[in-house]
């Protein structure tokens, strides 16, 4: 691909309304592709409307996309998200000892530290156990929390003994992830989650809005973001940090641009003990942009439509995380500031060498 930058129109001001929200629960399993019948019905319903429900949300904030023919690559982001475990809700690694080795869980180690250092019986592991649901959907887990943590927090890579309590690197990551599973404040979502209910629009997030979002978030700001990478009912949040686009004009219609975009994200893993680097995965999206040629040869986008395989497989919504986002856990025994204290001590080497028995 030719290194370059998607040309972006100047922002038109914050005309849109930004609302705080909680990231949807996430899936990290394979499968779950949307049926062709569902996609066809969504296509037909959208073709009957001249203006989609939330068509201009991204562009109401940042203005319309301006594009030119060519190949473009986003610059390096300020942060590269880390690959992590997604903690399926059906499993007990977060709060129960390993049945094979007897190793304590992350929350049990946290409880030990809270009792030893803060003089508090935090009961975080017990609280988590009470919320355990063996009948949860197979796709439910903490991909939302992992995606957010991997963007906002450096990855602990070394085991450490903090104030006499041993923490594996996997424990430290788990605790950071858990601090992002509650309702954050200040996060901004573009696109509506598809839940398969009446009134939901399967084709949202629309490709013209997605393209404009990429222009701003990756090509201009070089900031990673969270994306639900599939349009179905299940939510598969992943942390995106790179994109490339190929834009070509239609030879027969000057009002159409054909686009292929490759989006790269840090992948999840199925192993709690994974402690390697970022595993990048790239996914391909196809769409057409509709609009008008401008006098300077550029193209002003008015709307868009998913094409090819992307009619069924396209992003559902995207999320921007501010650097100062407040976060909390649904587990009332877990304090984010205490987790930060533990992780900071571990990563700075301010540790002791005599673990608590």
Image (cartoon, rainbow, N blue to C red):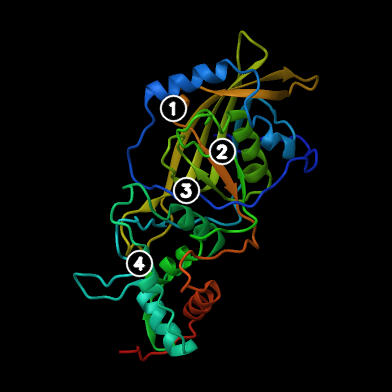
Residue 290 visible from this viewpoint: yes
Residue 10 x/y as whole percent: 78, 37
SS class, disc 4: helix
Q: Which residue is mark 1?
A: 312
Mark 3 or 4, closer to the camera: 4
Residue 238 badge:
3
Instruction: Using the image, tell me which numbered label, if any, was put on residue 192.
Output: 2
Q: Whole-percent x and y of residue 102?
A: 22, 75
Relative placement, left or right, of 326 versus 300 is: left
Q: Earlier in the sequence, mark 3 or mark 1?
A: 3
Identify the residue at horizontal 52%, vertical 28% (top origin). 203
Q: Is residue 345 above or below residue 262?
A: below
Marks 3 and 1 sit apart, C-alpha to C-alpha, by 18 Å
Q: CA distance from mark 1 to mark 4?
A: 38 Å
Q: Nearer the viewer, mark 3 or mark 2?
A: 2
The CA span between labels 2 and 4 is 31 Å
């Amino acid at each position: 691909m030719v290194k370059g930058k998607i040309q972006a129109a100047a922002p038109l001001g914050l005309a849109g309304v930004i609302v705080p929200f909680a990231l949807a629960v996430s899936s990290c399993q394979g499968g779950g592709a949307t049926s062709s019948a569902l996609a066809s019905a969504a296509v037909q319903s959208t073709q009957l409307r001249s203006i989609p429900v939330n068509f201009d949300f991204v562009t109401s904030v940042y203005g319309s996309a301006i594009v030119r023919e060519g190949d473009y690559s986003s610059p390096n982001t300020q942060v590269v998200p880390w690959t992590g475990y997604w903690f399926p809700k059906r499993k007990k690694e977060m709060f129960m000892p390993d049945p094979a080795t007897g190793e304590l869980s992350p929350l049990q180690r946290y409880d030990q530290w809270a009792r030893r250092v803060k003089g508090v019986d935090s009961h975080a592991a017990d609280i988590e156990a009470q919320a355990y649901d063996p009948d949860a959907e197979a796709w439910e887990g903490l991909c939302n929390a992992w995606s957010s943590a991997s963007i906002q927090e450096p990855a602990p890579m070394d085991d450490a003994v903090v104030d006499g309590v041993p923490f594996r690197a996997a424990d430290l990551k788990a605790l950071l992830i858990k601090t992002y599973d509650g309702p954050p404040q200040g996060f901004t979502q573009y696109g509506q989650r598809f839940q398969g209910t009446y009134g939901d629009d399967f084709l949202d997030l629309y490709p013209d809005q997605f393209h404009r979002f990429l222009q701003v978030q990756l090509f201009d700001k070089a900031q990673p973001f969270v994306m639900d990478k599939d349009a179905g009912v299940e939510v598969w949040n992943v942390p995106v940090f790179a994109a490339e686009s190929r834009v070509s004009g239609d030879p027969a219609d000057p009002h159409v641009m054909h686009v292929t975009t490759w989006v790269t994200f840090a992948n999840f893993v199925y192993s709690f003990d994974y402690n390697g680097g970022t595993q990048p995965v790239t996914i391909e999206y196809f769409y057409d942009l509709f609009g008008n040629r401008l006098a300077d040869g550029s193209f002003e986008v008015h709307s868009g439509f998913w094409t090819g395989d992307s009619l069924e497989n396209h992003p559902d919504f995207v999320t921007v995380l501010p650097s100062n986002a407040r976060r909390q856990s649904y587990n009332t025994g877990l304090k984010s500031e205490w987790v930060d204290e533990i992780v900071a001590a571990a990563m700075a080497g301010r540790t002791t060498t005599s673990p608590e028995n």
